[in-house]
Amino acid sequence: MAKAYERIADDLRQLIRAGELHPGDQLPSETKLVEQYGKSLPTLRQALSLLQAEGLIEKVHGRGNFVRLPRTLVQRTNGRHQWEKDRAREPEPLRAQTGSTERDTGLELNDLVFYAAYREIKAEGAIAEAFGIPVGTALLERTYRTRYRAESAPFNLVRSYLVRDMVAENPDLLDESKEPWPGGTQSQLFTVGIELGRIEERITARPPTAEEAEELGLPPGTSVLVLRKTSYDVAGRPVDISDVTLPGDRTELLFTTDLERW
Amino acid sequence: MAKAYERIADDLRQLIRAGELHPGDQLPSETKLVEQYGKSLPTLRQALSLLQAEGLIEKVHGRGNFVRLPRTLVQRTNGRHQWEKDRAREPEPLRAQTGSTERDTGLELNDLVFYAAYREIKAEGAIAEAFGIPVGTALLERTYRTRYRAESAPFNLVRSYLVRDMVAENPDLLDESKEPWPGGTQSQLFTVGIELGRIEERITARPPTAEEAEELGLPPGTSVLVLRKTSYDVAGRPVDISDVTLPGDRTELLFTTDLERW
DNA sequence: GAGTGGTCTAGACCACTGT
DNA sequence: CAGTGGTCTAGACCACTCC
């Protein structure tokens, strides 16, 4: 005999899958469902919380439970890296026109609100190892947010690390008030003579932490994509390490791999 | 005044983050925690279920609650595509030695158990559009699982689509009993004269469905990576579309992008 | 104010794990 | 068997949304 809350969840799940309940539809009220299934309220709510964790329904306090709508996508491609590199040496007016985020989202510069904070820290274990530098080396930590003006939650959270001595030659790079830098990080690195040769991106997925759910405005029943981008210069030396947190329900990463001809 | 279950969750979260509770450690029993926080059992359990949803703790029936251990990684790189292409024309003995999965996991062929099922279906809306073919065209649907012999759950779930008429020229390709085909799909396509030129991979993340959690043996508090791989031949025509579901807590996708020199 | 979901309690009984 | 978490109930009261 199956558990009561699972039977209820299965039943509702099937109604949704079969299309008897459409995205956006409101479910019967919890008290109605209690009558219908002949179980207690807490049991019924346990069933609903299962469906919520699967991202199938959305609970709205004071209004009801609704079948969740698919979210609109923001695409992030690996083509952006070559595109950014091509722009890095262009004159500032062109670089300032459109950045990678605008390219990905199709939005205008004016639609976007940008925020950055810089901080100087000492490299600890994992980061030091990734850079191949001694623990304690001075790093520049840059924290970014970009959001659509009409929405409250940003598209993503970015924390980027640079070895301070590699960029200190240009004092502007240590100054957060110079952000957003036209053309992005590759343009910044260009001013201190660094050319990127290769970019590695490592991707995993997990449920958001409480803080991420808060900052990204993520409802329960969503996941985050965690992307660690490591940029290498043409000599193969790691130059920039960025940790990017992206909402899984509205982000699509697109990677294109070209194959050599036979 | 914060909600009781949030205060408890915050408190326990902090103990874990601060390292006062190490991965693998057992938490105090639920009745102990009830005394300690002076709240009811259901409230306390609500707090614990929050932490479970975040993947921070693991509940084990009859034993206790434990701080979750980090899982071992299976890496999947985009370098695998060129590697597979290079192998596609090699003689069978070499192709049979090691496949992409063995390359990714570092395991031996004997450690792996492979399962495949073929089915013929008619293209419906989304897939037909992705292939650029009329709805109703005959497709070959191939479903794969690969698992480590010592574990019960597979590494991933794969569903792959081919246009039947593009491959029917070699009847072996329609026969599931011929799996695992030495050298993989690219070798199979080679037998009907198809050479791949480009591969696109689209990645999103979401909580597992009930079925996926079941099949992949995923505990609550995990996410899945959803990867749609589209393979194009050298003429830019889509040849294979594969949907891959990967456990987010033990999979790392690694994409390398090489940049052109200045 | 009516209707909705959110929080919390007190307690019973079941099921699994280890000794 | 003792100790642990899992399921379920009945009911009180709070908080939000919309008319």
Image: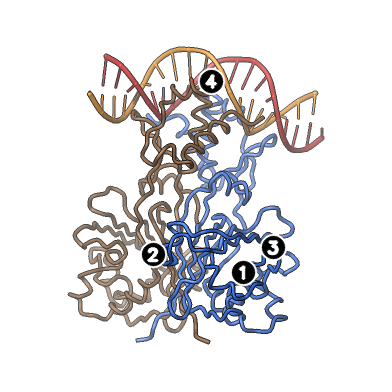
Chain colours: A brown, B blue, C red, D orange
Mark 1 touches mark 2? (CB < 8 Å)? no
Residue located 20% across and 76% down the image: A92
Q: Mark 1 vs mark 2: give the one in front.
A: 1
Going from N to C along the chain, the mark reached first, 3 or 1, is: 1
Give the alpha-carbon distance from disc 4 to disc 3, as whole Å.
Answer: 45 Å
Q: Mark 1 vs mark 4: give the one in front.
A: 4
In which chain is the residue bearing label 4?
A
Q: Pointer 1: what residue?
A: B104
Which amino acid does the dot numbered 3 rest on? Answer: Phe
Residue located 69% across and 34% down the image: B62
Regarding residue B10, the answer to whether it shows in the image is no
> Residue B60, which numbered label?
none
Q: Quadrant of the N terminus of chain B?
A: top left
Q: Pointer 4: what residue?
A: A38
Residue located 65% across and 56% down the image: B154
> Residue A160, which numbered label?
2
Mark 4 touches mark 3? (CB < 8 Å)? no
Above or below: residue B111 compared with residue B209: below
Give the alpha-carbon distance from disc 1 to disc 2, as whole Å.
Answer: 28 Å
Give the alpha-carbon distance from disc 3 to disc 2, as whole Å.
Answer: 41 Å
In which chain is the residue bearing label 3?
B
Regarding residue B4, the answer to whether it shows in the image is yes
